[in-house]
Image (spheres, rainbow, N blue to C red):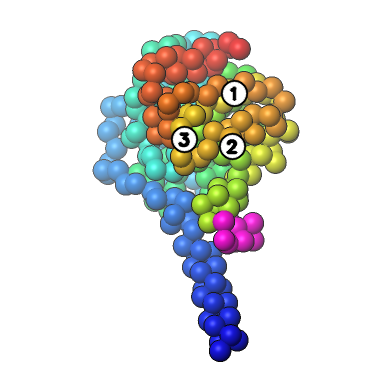
Amino acid sequence: MLLIVCSVLAFLYVGLCVAAFFLQRSMLYPAPKAPIPLPASEGFDRLPLEGGSYVDVLYLPAPEGAPTVVHFHGNGEQLLNQLDLGAVFHQHGLGFLAVEYPGYGASPGQPTEAGIYAVAEAALARLRQRGVTPAHTVLSGRSLGTGVAVEMARRGHGARVMLVSPYTSIVDMGALLLPFLPTSLLARDRFDSLAKAPDVELPVLIIHGEQDTLIPVDMGLRLGARFRHAVVETVPGAGHNDVLERSGPERVRRMAAFALGGS
């Protein structure tokens, strides 16, 4: 009887691991959809990709000589949600470029870590073609997008990095949410910012809500300690989805000042 019970439990556990392996991307990338086409008058454009595909981008050019913030959004957001953030940065004298992920919004395809990196590279290449140099590029990410910003910084893009509600890695997030599964073996997309952080020489600003119940503030603090030049600012009372909004425009003003070269 004991052998039968153990066999059934082992079978169920293996089945759970298999389900987690094949379903994890649907959980990691909920991919909200947007109306098609996107509003043409708001700075939206289409970025062609290799293979004939494309993603949508939002581009607000910078004033002459000013930096451009290249922003990568969270996994529950889409490009349309970045309009307000882009407008505020633009009001502070910055350019703004936000890129959609494959399968998100009105963009076709399926999101993966490698695919999102390829889109980010294509968007940065387009920015270079518009005359924006790496020295005038500020990489920015929120939640899932922080892993994209860190990878682009590791590859040598940009002059500064801003991370809002960052995680250490998707493996660590999986272990936090599903501690009974071998997430280090099952994770298909890793976004391992903690391992990459020592390779980033750029100034980094981290903003994290102290009451974040999705990505604990401890992850932001641990990640900040791994960068060579990082400032970590925690926001009392703020959670995961309201960390920039908690104190009104103050937090975005802080990011804008950092993007313009402040400490």
Instruction: Check the image and name the residue furthest to the front.
Output: 1
Q: CA distance from mark 1 to mark 2?
A: 11 Å
Query: Which residue lies under the disc numbered 2?
Result: 219
Q: Give the quarter of the image for residue 187.
A: bottom right
Identity of the residue drawn at 30% across and 43% down: 34
Residue 151: percent from left, percent from top: 62, 38
Q: Give the quarter of the image for residue 153.
A: top right
Q: Closer to the camera, 142 or 41?
A: 142
Query: Which residue lies under the disc numbered 3?
Result: 212
**Cβ atoms at labels 2 and 3 below 8 Å apart:** no
Residue 82 appears left or right of 63: left
Residue 198 appears left or right of 241: right
Identity of the residue drawn at 39% across and 43% down: 76
Residue 67 seen anywhere in this rendered image of the structure:
no
228 inside magenta stretch: no
Residue type highlighted by circle 3? Asp
Whether residue 19 is situated above or below residue 83 in the rendered picture: below
For the magenta stretch, what is the residue range? 179-187
Classed neighbour count for the residue bearing mark 1: other residues with Cα under 10 Å, few (<14), some (14–19), many (≥20): some
Residue type highlighted by circle 1? Val
Residue 1: percent from left, percent from top: 56, 89
> Which of pointers 3 and 1 lies earlier in the amino acid sequence?
3
Question: In the image, which disc is placed on residue 232?
Answer: 1
Q: CA distance from mark 2 to mark 3?
A: 10 Å
Question: In the image, which disc is placed on residue 145?
Answer: none
Residue type highlighted by circle 2? Met
